[in-house]
């Protein structure tokens, strides 16, 4: 199954009774609305720590003392009160972006591209956005169906998260190691 933005847009369009499109950059107002809504839902989900979008890392300062945060990192989870400002790490405690040593064990939370999302996350994002997208139709049948889709998709996402979250490289699971390597290289 493809986890592309175009597929997600078309699912929303069909749910609203609009014909699918062949280009995600279509200027049709429903396409623009669907795309905006989907990106907002993806960003919302990506703000949470899931097995597919978190990585514990050590970040090192460059020659000027700045620590550049990897591309597509949405947020951080760390005990040292660091945050991201202008693509660089910023210490709230020291009130500076200049570091003299590595920052260890910082959890990076990524906003993955559509084609990098596992199917469980893709389905939950689409289901959540679809419910909001069809809400103006005021159809009880469609709304109930959309709410059921959200419930099922969230359950599958939670099961996958429970299954994979604590599986790290140290477990020796070759499939998980291969998946992690593929995801971290992107």
Image (cartoon, rainbow, N blue to C red):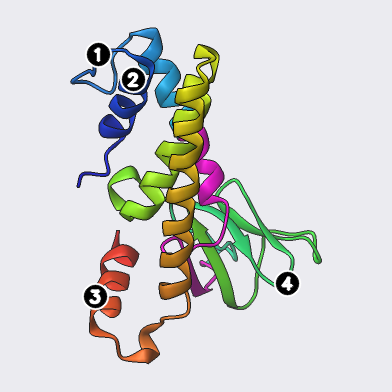
Residue 107: name its quadrant: bottom right
Observer-side mark, 1 or 3, equals 1
Q: Which residue is mark 3?
A: 178
- Which residue has dot 4 on it? 80
Residue that badge 1 annotates: 19
What is the C-alpha distance between the residues marked 3 and 2? Answer: 35 Å
Q: Nearer the viewer, mark 4 or mark 2?
A: 2
| C-alpha gap between disc 4 and disc 2 | 44 Å
Along the line of sight, the residue nearer the viewer: 87 or 106: 106
How many other residues sit within 10 Å of disc 1, few (<14), some (14-19) or many (≥20)?
A: few
Reply above or below: 18 against 9: above
Label 1 secondary element: loop
Residue found at the very far front of the displayed protein:
141
Decide whether residue 43 is among the magenta residues. yes
Within 10 Å of disc 2 (Cα), the crowding (few <14, some 14-19, many 20+) is many
Q: Are marks 4 and 2 in contact (CB under 8 Å)?
A: no
How far apart, in angstroms, are the residues tagged by discs 1 and 4? 50 Å
Q: Earlier in the sequence, mark 4 or mark 2?
A: 2
Secondary element type, mark 3: helix
Residue appearing at x 50%, y 74% in the figure:
57
Residue in view at x 41 percent, y 81 percent: 167
Q: Is residue 140 visible?
A: yes
Discs 1, 2 touching: Cβ within 8 Å? yes
Instruction: Check contact, mark 4 vs mark 3: CB within 8 A.
Output: no
Between disc 3 and disc 2, whose residue precedes? 2
Magenta residues, as a range? 39-62
Measured as percent of width and height from the top left, residue 102 is found at 58, 77
Disc with the residue nearer the chain's start (1 vs 3): 1
């Amino acid at each position: 199954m493809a986890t592309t933005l175009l597929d997600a847009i078309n699912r929303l369009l069909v749910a609203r009774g609009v014909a699918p499109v062949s280009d995600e950059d279509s200027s049709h107002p429903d396409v623009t609305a669907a795309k905006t809504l989907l990106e907002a839902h993806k960003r919302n989900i990506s703000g949470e720590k899931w097995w597919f979008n978190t990585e514990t890392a050590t970040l090192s300062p460059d020659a000027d003392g700045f620590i550049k945060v990897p591309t597509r990192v949405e947020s951080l989870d760390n005990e040292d009160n660091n945050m991201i400002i202008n693509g660089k790490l910023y210490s709230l405690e020291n009130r500076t972006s200049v570091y003299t040593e590595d920052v260890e064990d910082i959890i990076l939370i990524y906003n993955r591209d559509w084609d990098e999302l596992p199917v469980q996350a893709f389905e939950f994002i689409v289901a959540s956005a679809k419910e909001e997208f069809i809400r103006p139709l005021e159809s009880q049948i469609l709304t109930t169906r959309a709410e059921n889709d959200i419930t099922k998709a969230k359950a599958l996402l939670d099961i996958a998260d429970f299954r994979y979250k604590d599986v790290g490289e140290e477990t020796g699971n070759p499939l998980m190691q291969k998946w992690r390597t593929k995801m971290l290289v992107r």
